[in-house]
Every structure is written in C-alpha cells, then in structure tokens.
Image (cartoon, helix red, strand yellow):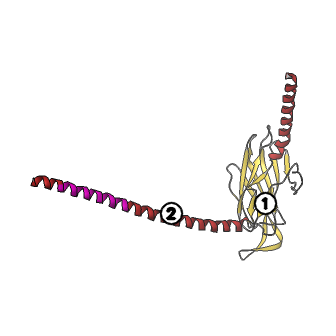
Amino acid sequence: MKIANRRVVTVGALAAGAVLLVAGPASAHVSVDPQQAPKGGYSTVNFKVPNEKDDASTVKLEVTFPADHPLVSVMPQPVPGWDVKVEKKKLDKPLVSHGEKITEAVSKVTWSGGKVEPGQFQQFPVSMGQLPEDGDQLVFKALQTYDDDDVVRWIEQPRKGEPEPENPAPVLKLTAAQQEETDGSSAGDGKAAEAAAASSDSGTDSDSDTTARVLGVVGIVVGAAGIAYGVLAGRRRA
C-alpha cells in the first residue's frame, strides 16, 4: 500500500514538473501593460521584458509599431541605464491630427546599452496615441537580444479561438471604455452629490440635536440654581 502511494506521489510530482516546464516559457514573453486601452485616446504602455535565460542577459529590445494603424505621437520615457532610438517612416497616406497634416509616423523604437539580468525583468514605458478608432487591437512585433547573440523573435500574432503561439507578439486590445468611463464618472458624480447632501442633512440634524442638548443642560443648571437660592433664602428667613 505504501509503495503504491509513493508511486502516486512520484507520478504527480513529475506531472507537475512537466506542466511548469511547458507553462514557464509561454508565460514569460514580452508583453504590454496594461493590456487594453480606449479607442481614440492616448495611453502610456509598458513593454514588459522578462529574462528567460539563466546564463545570459537581455541587452536590446526592438519594438516595431503597426504600419496599418500608424501612431502620430510616440514618446518613450527615459529608462536609467538604457539608450533609446526612435525611427520614423513616411506614410503612404498623410494623416490629419489636431488640424495638422502628418506625413510620417514612428515605425520602430529600440532600447540598448542596458542589461536585464537572469531572474529579472524590465519595463520600457511609451506614451502613444492617438489610438485608432477603427480597430480592435494593435500588434507590436518585438525582438529580444541577449548578450550571447541569441535573438528571440516575439512576432507571432495570437488569433482568437486558437492556442497561444510559441512566440506571441505583444498585443494591445482596443476598447470602447472611454465612453463607459465617462458615463461611470457622471453616475459617480451623481452619487457623490447625493452622499454630500445626505451628509449635509445628517450634519444639520446633528447640529440641531447638539443645540437642544445644550439648552436642556442650561435649563437644568438654571433650575437647580433657583432651587438652591430658594432653600438658602428660606433658611435666612428662619
């Protein structure tokens, strides 16, 4: 019986180890954070780069921006220890943004000069916009280079209803959440106003109660003083 139990435990441990080995690389890929942003707006997106190796460091990240939805504004935030290079490309069809004609857009951003050591990750923030209104997602193809000259190409586009590819590209989902947030803010403002009114009414009731209590105490003190005076006066007459 004990031998059978040991076999069950051993098989379970091996299976769990196999699951970890399979799930590890799939979960540790270059990704974006947050994973979604409202259409038509501006958003700060972090390209999250984990180091998947135990004997090499990540020394460069190249992110290619989608050509089918060119972004007019792309501004990387400085990352200590890293150099950043922004490349632009002329548009086949000019865009109009805030009344200005735009003839080029950012095609690639490259970070280099730093290191992501084994067991660590690094985030590379980028402010981008105006996000398209006629799409559901933006796909950013990324190349991760290690100091042993190995290059991991995170360029495979995940497809709905299909298993995640071996080297998925970072994907930013586009939602219509902006309007919902506005509606939510309006509803929240209404609730805040109601709460403030309720608090005001409560404060008024509390003030009234306090005033009544003070007057009651004053009346008791005055009455007690009158009684004491009457007693003293009676004693003096006697």
Secondary structure category for the residue under label 1: strand
Outermost residue on the bottom side: it is: 99
Q: Decide whether residue 215 is among the magenta residues.
A: yes
Instruction: Decide if residue 162 is on the left or right side of residue 171.
Output: right
Q: Which secondary structure dominates the residues rendered in magenta? A: helix
Q: 12 and 3: which one is in front?
A: 3
Q: Which mark is residue 173?
A: 1
Can you give x and y, in whole percent of width and height, for residue 224 in the image? 25, 55
What residue do we see at 27% from left, 56% from top? 221
Residue for badge 2? 199
Mark 1 burial class by Cα count in 10 Å: few <14, some 14-19, many 20+: some
What residue do we see at 77% from left, 42% from top? 57
Amino acid at dot 1: Lys
Image quadrant where residue 191 sits: bottom right
Labelled pair 2, 1 in contact (Cβ < 8 Å):
no
Instruction: Decide if residue 202 is on the left or right side of residue 39.
Output: left
Image quadrant where residue 22 sits: top right
Can you give x and y, in whole percent of width and height, for residue 75 in the image? 71, 61
What residue do we see at 29% from left, 57% from top? 220
Magenta-highlighted residues: 212-230
Can you give x and y, in whole percent of width and height, for residue 55 in the image? 80, 37
Amino acid at dot 2: Ser
**3D distance between C-alphas at marks 2 and 1:** 41 Å
Q: 183 and 166: which one is in front?
A: 183
Position of residue 12 relative to residue 204, above or below, is above
Outermost residue on the right side: it is: 162
Q: 184 and 61: which one is in front?
A: 184
- Mark 2 or mark 1, which is nearer to you? 2
